[in-house]
Image: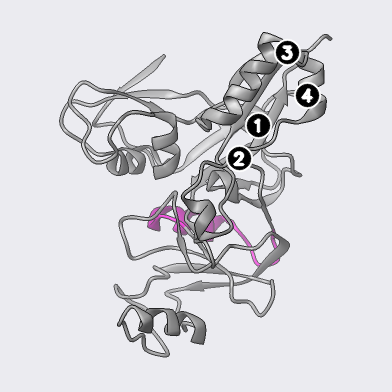
Amino acid sequence: MVLFLHTFSVSAVEYQLPSHGSRIIGKNLTHITEKSEDLESIAAKYNVGFLALIAANPGISPHLVEPGTFIKIPQQLILPVVDYEGIVVNLAELRLYYFEKGKNNVHVFPIGIGRVGRETPLMTTRIRTKRENPTWRPTKEIRKEYLEREIELPAVVPPGPDNPLGTHALRLDYGAGEYLIHGTNKDFGIGLRVSSGCIRMRPTDIVWLFDKSRVGETVKIINQAVKISVEPDGAVFVEAHRPLSRTKEERDKRLVSRPDDLLTEWLGDDSLHAKRYRATLAVQSGIPVEVGTMPL
């Protein structure tokens, strides 16, 4: 178990790609609080998402954590089933992966995505343009939504502290170009479904990605709520996240991914391994759990 006190802080989380046959990267950390803290501030210190930290620490109040509490930091994960290139966004886990060209590593960032009714679409596209100090031109639909909340948005929001796009933005070559990967002028919302469809990053993270990425680079947005890895020794690991709600009614319900029939059969339908697999899907800790072993 790796322990850190409350003074520990990081910006980007970089991982070496796993050896052949494995898809697990990183190790979970344990943060011990020395004073009263909240999970949002702890998430920011370790650059993980707010909901991810809540899922990994059930039973702990997100708003007030007592001194001496052990907080699990979910930094071990299973890579999604994709080509390891460019930018990959997995909506279900609220993470962005950046695979550097020619390097054996991946950088992982927590993100905010589109809320219910304003979902971030699945896509395979590329970066159309990069803008430093972007101007925000809210759509008619967004301005109408704000008016319903008695907030009148201007047609154009110039660069500055009131601009919700933050200081840097990557425009995606999808649709009419209305979807961006951008920063934020707020200190909350990373690791949540809060945007109007764009992908939101912490200010330091978008600056890093802006500098590293290039126009024309591949961007793939996927939705994999359950990730599975069969390791070289036959150990089967499952990482389960809550499936995305598609309606306001679903938002208040407990959604669980359906077990994969083939994996259940391999584990043995009524075996302890299969039961552990189904329990992992139900708990949705967002942390890789060893559920059994496959015959080699």
Query: From this viewpoint, is residue 265 visible?
Result: yes
Please give the label number shown on residue 270. 3
Tell me how far mark 3 sits from mark 4, CA to CA.
12 Å
Q: Which mark is residue 191?
A: none
Q: Which mark is residue 106?
A: 2
Identify the residue shown where x is 42% and y is 70%: 165
**Residue 178 in the figure: left or right of residue 285:** right
Query: Which SS class for mark 3?
Result: loop
The correct choice, above or below, for 158 with respect to 124 in the image is below
Viewer-nearest residue: 152 or 162? 152
Is 266 displayed left or right of 13 in the figure? right
Is 86 one of the magenta-colored residues?
no
Q: Are marks 2 and 1 in contact (CB under 8 Å)?
A: yes
Mark 4 lies on residue: 263
In the displayed structure, 140 sits above or below 46; it is below
Q: Quadrant of the C terminus?
A: top right
In the rendered view, would you say 274 is above or below 46? Answer: above
Question: Which region is colored magenta?
Answer: 201-219
Local SS, label 2: strand
Q: Tell me which label, 4 or 2, sits earlier in the chain.
A: 2
Task: Give the residue number, with chain letter if any, for mark 1.
Answer: 17
Percent coordinates x, y for residue 204 in the rendering: 40, 54
Going by the numbered disc 1, the residue's amino acid type is Leu
In this view, the residue in front, 182 or 54, is 54
Query: Alpha carbon of mark 2 to alpha carbon of mark 1: how far?
Result: 7 Å
The type of residue carrying mark 4 is Leu
Spot occupied by residue 222 in the image (x, y as percentages of width and height): 68, 51
